[in-house]
Image (cartoon, rainbow, N blue to C red):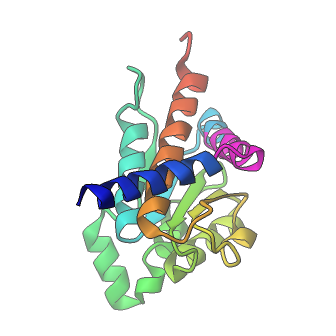
């Protein structure tokens, strides 16, 4: 059992070393710049994801609304899956593929950012939400794994983990999300 634990930790460590490539570091910076820009313009950040990615979306929205590390004013952010009545009504009356697109239609404004999280890069409901967000002039950020073909054309910034292992991808998504939250707080609230 200890050997299996070591293997999992080593797999995570090796993947994290790959994240130090300049293009990935620049992509995280660009994503943070979009979030910071939205807040400076009076916008908000919307998140969407399924399963573990929904948990990540909710977690990151909470970091922005509550606080990450600094005592500061609340920042407007919401995870689109948390209203279970809306989620289930839209899924029932339309389709599960529409659960996020309907909410982007309702809540998304041109100064906002939509962050779509899909470890596979193929989640139809995430892809549809990103497409509508682009049509509505929102900035779009995608978090995904190695498969980028479907999300790339829909995202202003695509954060792609160089892996196909879902747990490792989700770990990196949270790392990147926390970095973005920290950069956002630093830019908006340092010295204020």
Quadrant location of residue 99?
A: bottom left
- Kindly report the secondary structure that dominates the magenta region of the rendered protein: helix
| Residue extending farthest left | 1
| Residue 32 at x, y percent in the picture | 63, 40
Q: Residue at x 47, y 40 (%)?
A: 178
Quadrant location of residue 159?
A: bottom right
Q: Which residues are magenta?
A: 19-35
| Residue extending farthest front | 3
Q: Residue at x 55, y 54 (%)?
A: 15
| Residue 39 at x, y percent in the picture | 59, 37
Quadrant location of residue 160?
A: bottom right
Question: Magenta stretch: residue 64 in it?
Answer: no
Q: Residue at x 76, y 44 (%)?
A: 22
| Residue 72 at x, y percent in the picture | 42, 22
| Residue 61 at x, y percent in the picture | 41, 47
Quarter placement of the N terminus: bottom left
Q: How many marks?
A: 0
Q: Residue at x 31, y 81 (%)?
A: 89
Relative to 147, residue 42 above or below: above
| Residue extending farthest top | 191
Relative to 139, residue 54 above or below: below
Question: Magenta stretch: residue 22 in it?
Answer: yes
């Amino acid at each position: 059992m200890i050997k299996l634990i070591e293997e999992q930790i080593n797999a995570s460590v090796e993947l994290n070393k790959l994240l130090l490539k300049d293009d990935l570091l620049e992509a995280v910076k660009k994503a943070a710049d979009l979030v910071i820009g939205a807040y400076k313009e009076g916008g908000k950040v919307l998140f969407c994801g399924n399963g573990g990615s929904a948990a990540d979306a909710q977690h990151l929205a909470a970091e922005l609304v509550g606080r990450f590390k600094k005592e500061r004013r609340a920042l407007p952010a919401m995870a689109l899956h948390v209203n279970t009545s809306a989620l289930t009504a839209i899924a029932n009356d339309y389709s599960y593929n529409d659960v996020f697109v309907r909410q982007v239609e309702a809540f998304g404004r041109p100064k906002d950012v939509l962050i779509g999280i899909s470890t596979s890069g193929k989640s139809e409901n995430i892809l549809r939400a990103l497409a509508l967000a682009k049509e509505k002039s929102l900035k779009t950020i995608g978090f995904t794994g190695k498969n980028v073909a479907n999300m790339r054309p829909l995202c202003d910034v695509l954060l792609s983990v160089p892996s196909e292992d879902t747990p490792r991808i989700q770990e990196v998504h949270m790392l990147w999300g926390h970095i973005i939250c920290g950069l956002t707080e630093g830019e908006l609230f340092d010295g204020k």
